[in-house]
Image (tube, rainbow, N blue to C red):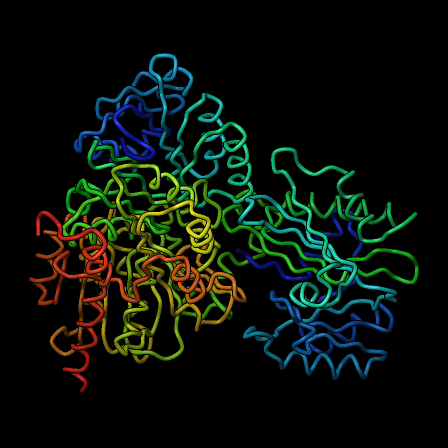
Amino acid sequence: MAILVDRDSTIAIQGITGREASMVTRHALAYGTKIAAGITPGKGGQFVEGVPVYDTLRQACEEKQITTTVVYVPPAFAYDAVMEAIGNNVKLVLVITERIPRKDVVRFLAAAKEAGTTVVGPNSVGILNPEDRIKLGAIGGDNVERCFVPGPVGVISRSGGMTAECSWMVKRAGYGVSASVSIGGDPLVGSTPKDILARFEKDEKTKAVVMWGEPGTASEENVADFIKEGGYTKPLIAFVGGKFVEDMPEGTVFGHAASIVQGDSGRPSLKKKKLKEAGAFVPEYFNDIIPILRDVLGKPQSA
Amino acid sequence: MARVLESIGKELLKKSGIPVPEFRTAKNEKEALAAAEELGYPVVVKALVAVGKKGKAGAIKFANNGEEVQSQAKEILSMTVRNFPVDALLIEKKLDIVSELYLSVTYNDNTRSPLIIASSEGGIDIEEISREHPDKIISYGVNPLDGFFQYQAKEIAAALGLKEKLLQKGTQLIYRMYQFFDRYDATIVEINPLALTADGDLVAAAILMGVDDDALYRQPDLKDRVEAGGDRSWRPLTELEKEMVAVDAAESYRGTARYTEMVGGDIGFLCGGGGGSLLAFDSLLRFGGQPANYTEFGGNPTKTKVAGLVKGVLSKSGVKSFFMDANITNNTQTDVVAEGIIQAFEEKRIDVKKFPVVIRLAGVNDAKAREIFQSAGIEYYGDDITMEDAAKIIIDRMKEIYG
């Protein structure tokens, strides 16, 4: 069992007939992930890479017990798609779509919370569980093993690209990942780094976590508080990028929409300080993730 | 976020039933004078720039006659407010203010819901209010599923100490302000000060407003009136930046890109991925480099888009090298990126023997990307080195060539 997705997950892709979604479906199937259904209104009865397409999620749920959906629909329709998933009692909704209006995100996140549905994203590149060979979203592309091999390290990233890069650093250190989660680059996301960390805490396979942090939001500060409260007790290696942003004119966005410094809020230096005080390993340089992992986990078997 | 000019914000407020001072806009002294004569003295002369804290910058003045209007208009038009040169003015009828309140709606990222902040101590920054009058701040969260009710507006108005007729006026205004925030897909609406006038009216004397870039498609009232991505720069966009926005928009269906010019710098910098760009930029500085720009793309852009971006990067004066540093891509086809870079190099006649170039680009189709770069004589790395290692190499190459 891993976090969020495992062999018991039954997966559907909302918006499967789109260019990006059908490519991702092909890559996921090639990796060994089972995709039970796709949803695109008006295209029911068709197949994408052999996956049956339904007009509504309800029809798919009637035939298969869909537990997990991946949302690939365009921004203007994303609100309805997430509400459709919540309305059909899906347990996990991974929202890949980026540039969804903030007002819509706020509403579907509130609805999900009320219904007890887990949302990851929006603007996530995906979730990967290498042991069960489950790949949701573009994460890993057509060459998953390059970055993602099974192992004891959890990866949490506010950046989609750095989800792969961090997982690759883990592999380079001689280990692999229990799961890698791209939480999404927006200021408002369904699952925060703290939420994912709480899941890694309970996951027996995970022995340590590597986290990619950025300027902006209180994500890293909340993680530090969570550790101090005893919510997470395993080693955490937390890298915070974007130090240069502190020397740029205040209130300017670099990288992701959430990556903004205003006053003291969102400053990488303060995030690092809080994480260190909480007992996390906070590498000054990205390359240092490798020696720290080796210190924490002991000699890798493959090294 | 798209910043909304105060004149547009006030026009929309008025349309939504929120009282604002009578106003005109003016581009020069002559227009300012005509506006003031029409409105009647005294008037307020304000810089019309889409940033806050104008008063602090000395860009808000009061005039009692034509002479004062002209001299103040002249002075303010020569100013730059927080990096934004003033090229227009807002001329307003001066209110007879008894007291100043504060009102705003924004999103609270922690609770993931709209948050109304109100205070009886308006007229100064919210930071100042929270420092000097922490007990006078009313924070009111709104449940996004239920929406906002009249009674909640009334509770806020009452907490502000408004009574009798003013309680009713305040309730209406707060209720309408929330509807306004919601209707225009705003990310922030700040009315400061909310003026209580001698006539017993509540008037939005100033508004700061930002609208969600991602919702502009459904805001016809704001079409072509606001500039998306206003928070991506601390000053107005430069010509080159505007060109790069056009390069991105020309193929908006594939890939996203942004380009920001730095002050000075000599490294033409291109990065794939928002997070990766932070790491690469930090690394260049760490090794003593000075990026001339910040350029980032993602989402599998086309060859034309990449070429357009690279040409922009190389166009900035003072650029003495080219550095591409990307995280291992999930879906971006690296061979397409390679072709785009090569096309730009050819068009800009870059001689890679004399002009330092280092590429770190791994991911989808990178065997082909390697081949493309290597046959062009370009120093290429895939996942054989880290992103940090690559930053060190470009700095070394620059030292080798330029000393």
* Residue at 26% over, 60% down: B307
**Relative to A302, residue B59 above or below:** below
Closest to the observer, B60 or B138: B138
Q: Quadrant of the N terminus of chain A?
A: top left
Q: Position of residue B75 (x, y in %)?
A: 68, 83
Q: Where is residue A207 in the image (x, y as percent from the top left)?
A: 26, 44
Most distant residue in the bottom direction: B403
Left or right position of B293 against B100:
left
Closest to the observer, A84 or B78: A84
Q: How many marks?
A: 0
Left or right position of A55 against B116:
left
**Relative to B117, residue A53 above or below:** above
Q: Is residue B5 visible?
A: yes
* Residue at 76% over, 81% down: B70
**Relative to A149, residue B241 above or below:** below
Q: Where is residue A280 in the image (x, y as percent from the top left)?
A: 35, 57
Closest to the observer, B134 or B64: B134
Most distant residue in the top direction: A63
Left or right position of B362 against A69:
left
Which quarter of the figure has residue A129?
top left
Which quarter of the figure has residue B325?
bottom left
Left or right position of A199 against B6:
left
Q: Can residue B346 be seen in this view?
A: no
**Relative to B75, residue A17 above or below:** above
* Residue at 15% over, 42% down: A145
Q: Position of residue B384 (x, y in %)?
A: 12, 58
